[in-house]
Image: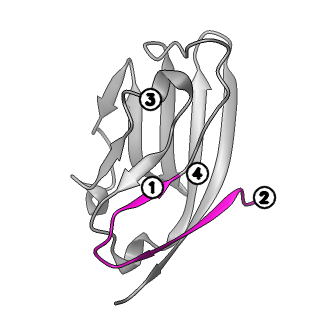
Amino acid sequence: GQLDTTCHAFVGETVVLPCTTTPPGELGLSKSMLYWQIGTKLVHFFHNGQDSWEGQDEKFHGRTSLFLDQMNHGNLSLKISNVQLWDDAEYSCIYKQAENHQTKKSTIKLHVSGK
């Protein structure tokens, strides 16, 4: 698919990969699912109103977070701390609203440079 955004970070930094959706009012987070993936690798998964660590790629363990207080206003961005060279990849932000199965997908390329 087409690339929506490109981000740059240095090793050891914290980076935010932007992803937003324009919600009709507030998003029903209890029913929706948000996947952040590199190909089929799961970087971060959110469903039933909370983070889920099941199936998360171990390289990202403890380094990813969402903006939970802003999600119902459409901010689906992912924060990655202590960026590593192997984080350099194309990320997919996939948002599914369960009730109407509407899917939003955007692609973010992260370039990582050594110090």
Gap in Å between the C-alphas at discs 4 and 1? 13 Å
- Residue 115 rendering spot, x and y as whole percentages: 34, 90
Instruction: Give how far across and how far down residue 24 sits, in percent.
Output: 68, 14
Earlier sequence position, callout 3 versus callout 1: 1
CA gap between label 3 and label 4 equals 19 Å
Q: Which residue is mark 1?
A: 16
In space, the residues marked 2 and 1 are separated at their CA atoms by 19 Å
Label 3's element? Answer: loop
User: SS class of the residue under badge 2?
Assistant: loop
CA gap, disc 4 to disc 2? 11 Å
SS of the residue at dot 1?
Answer: strand
Q: Amino acid at mark 2?
A: Gln
Q: Is residue 15 magenta?
A: yes
> Which disc number belongs to residue 2?
2
Q: Residues within 10 Å of mark 4 (few under 14, many from 20)?
A: many
Badge 1 amino acid: Val
Q: Residues within 10 Å of mark 2 (few under 14, many from 20)?
A: few
Which comes sooner in the sequence, label 4 or label 2?
Answer: 2
Q: Kindly identify the residue that appears in the image at 68 percent across and 12 percent down.
A: 100
